[in-house]
């Protein structure tokens, strides 16, 4: 039996309850598919298929092998699939062993909302920006419908989406973090702030394009506390006074993420008016992740600035799963013994344990707004 079916059969899924706002009597949605757009926070194999595969020890805590994910195991998008009783998403760019009957994943590690003006070989920024991902979706939708119609046997349709399901599917977005990280490298804070309206208008355009193709249910994550990624301090061991907040996060970067999220929330409110048949949930992932980081010890996790995988000693850094030379000797970047007790997997991405904690705090609806909406009821327009 497939893994996702085993999880369903074992009672893995918990009931989701609406938290107030008059939603107690709303029926659960029956999403037949998920279509995801994003970056490495939700990439389930896209960048591995397009470029070099992600290597061990990535994936080993759950999949027992690399699984195209930037974590030791599952991502939030995997927990979304589990909560909706759907299989894990195949990456659109992966040509082998894929099944698109219940959706597809267009996210790739390093993706931005705006088109990049640098190559992936410089700083890891993906060429598959959000406009490209939505273009791929439109092509996927048209081509899969054609193949579905042409199929001579029912078995030929087993790995293809039913064309009728696109209107009933859930469309998820988790993207924007890399637009900020590129900005921190290249621009002043004032320049980044000036660029935010255009960045968020482009995200809104992507939602609108899918809406025009019949999509109606949207689940949009805001961006996380990017200033809390341990990588920020890899080469800055003695930051000046006021540079960090009380939890060791880069304050200026988190302030920019908060401004990004404020404008994103405003743009979602406008989208609800512009797209009258759409149900659009704005999900405060920032609050969940920062809540975990600021209460790490209480929640049973290690220091959030400690990294599980890789070799990181002073200014010497060998990334997770890689080998490098340190003081004339070859050093390997291994996994820690207990990834489940860490928040940061590799300095940039979260562990499966942290992803599950965050998922548990957003999927019940307590951190989605106007009104609070659990993901199992995200088809209902507020």
Image: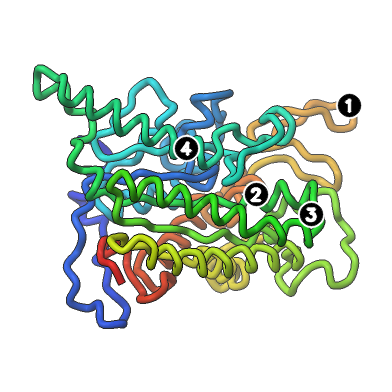
Disc assigned to residue 133: 4
Disc assigned to residue 233: 3
Q: Which label's residue is closer to the chain start, 4 or 2?
A: 4
Q: In the structure shown, which secondary structural element does the residue marked by tag 2 occupy?
A: helix
Q: Which label's residue is closer to the chain start, 4 or 1?
A: 4
Where, quadrant-wise, is the N terminus in this rendering? top left
Disc assigned to residue 300: none
* Residue that label 2 marks: 179
Residue in the image at 18% along x and 49% along y: 9
Residue contact between numbered discs 2 and 3, judged by CB atoms under 8 Å: no
Residue contact between numbered discs 3 and 1, judged by CB atoms under 8 Å: no
Q: Nearer the viewer, mark 4 or mark 3?
A: 4
* Residue that label 1 marks: 328
In this rendering, is residue 38 above or below 153? Answer: below
Residue in the image at 48% along x and 32% along y: 46
In this rendering, is residue 371 above or below 63? Answer: below
Q: In the structure shown, which secondary structural element does the residue marked by tag 4 occupy?
A: helix
């Amino acid at each position: 039996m497939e893994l996702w079916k085993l999880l369903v059969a074992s009672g893995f899924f918990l009931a989701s309850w609406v938290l107030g706002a008059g939603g107690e009597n709303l029926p659960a949605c029956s999403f037949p598919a998920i279509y995801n757009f994003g970056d490495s926070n939700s990439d389930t194999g896209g960048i591995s298929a397009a470029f070099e595969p992600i290597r061990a020890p990535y994936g080993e805590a759950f999949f027992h092998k690399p699984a195209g994910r930037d974590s030791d195991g599952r991502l939030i998008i995997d927990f979304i699939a589990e909560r909706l009783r759907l299989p894990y998403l195949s990456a659109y760019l992966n040509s082998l062993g894929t099944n698109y009957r219940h959706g597809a994943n267009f996210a790739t590690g390093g993706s931005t909302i705006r088109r990049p003006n640098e190559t992936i070989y410089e700083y890891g920024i993906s060429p598959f920006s959000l406009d490209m991902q939505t273009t791929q979706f439109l092509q996927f939708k048209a081509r899969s419908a054609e193949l579905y119609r042409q199929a001579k046997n029912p078995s030929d349709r087993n790995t293809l989406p039913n064309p009728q399901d696109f209107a009933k599917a859930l469309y998820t977005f988790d993207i924007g973090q890399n637009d900020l990280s590129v900005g921190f490298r290249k621009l002043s804070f004032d320049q980044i702030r000036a660029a935010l309206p255009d960045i968020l208008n482009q995200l809104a355009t992507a939602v609108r394009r899918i809406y025009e193709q019949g999509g109606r249910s949207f689940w949009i994550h805001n961006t996380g506390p990017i200033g809390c990624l341990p990588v920020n301090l890899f080469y800055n061991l003695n930051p000046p006074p006021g540079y960090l907040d009380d939890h060791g996060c880069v304050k200026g970067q988190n302030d920019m993420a908060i401004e990004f999220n404020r404008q994103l929330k405003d743009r979602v409110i406008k989208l609800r008016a512009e797209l009258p048949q759409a149900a659009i949930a704005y999900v405060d992932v920032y609050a969940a992740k920062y809540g975990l980081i600021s209460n790490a010890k209480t929640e049973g996790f290690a220091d959030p600035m400690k990294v599980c995988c890789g070799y990181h000693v002073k200014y010497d850094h060998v990334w997770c799963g890689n080998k490098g030379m340190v003081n004339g000797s070859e050093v390997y970047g291994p996994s820690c013994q207990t990834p489940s007790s860490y928040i940061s997997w590799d300095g940039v991405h979260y562990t499966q344990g942290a992803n599950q904690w965050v998922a548990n705090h957003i999927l019940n609806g307590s951190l989605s707004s106007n009104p609070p909406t659990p993901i199992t009821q995200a088809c209902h327009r507020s």
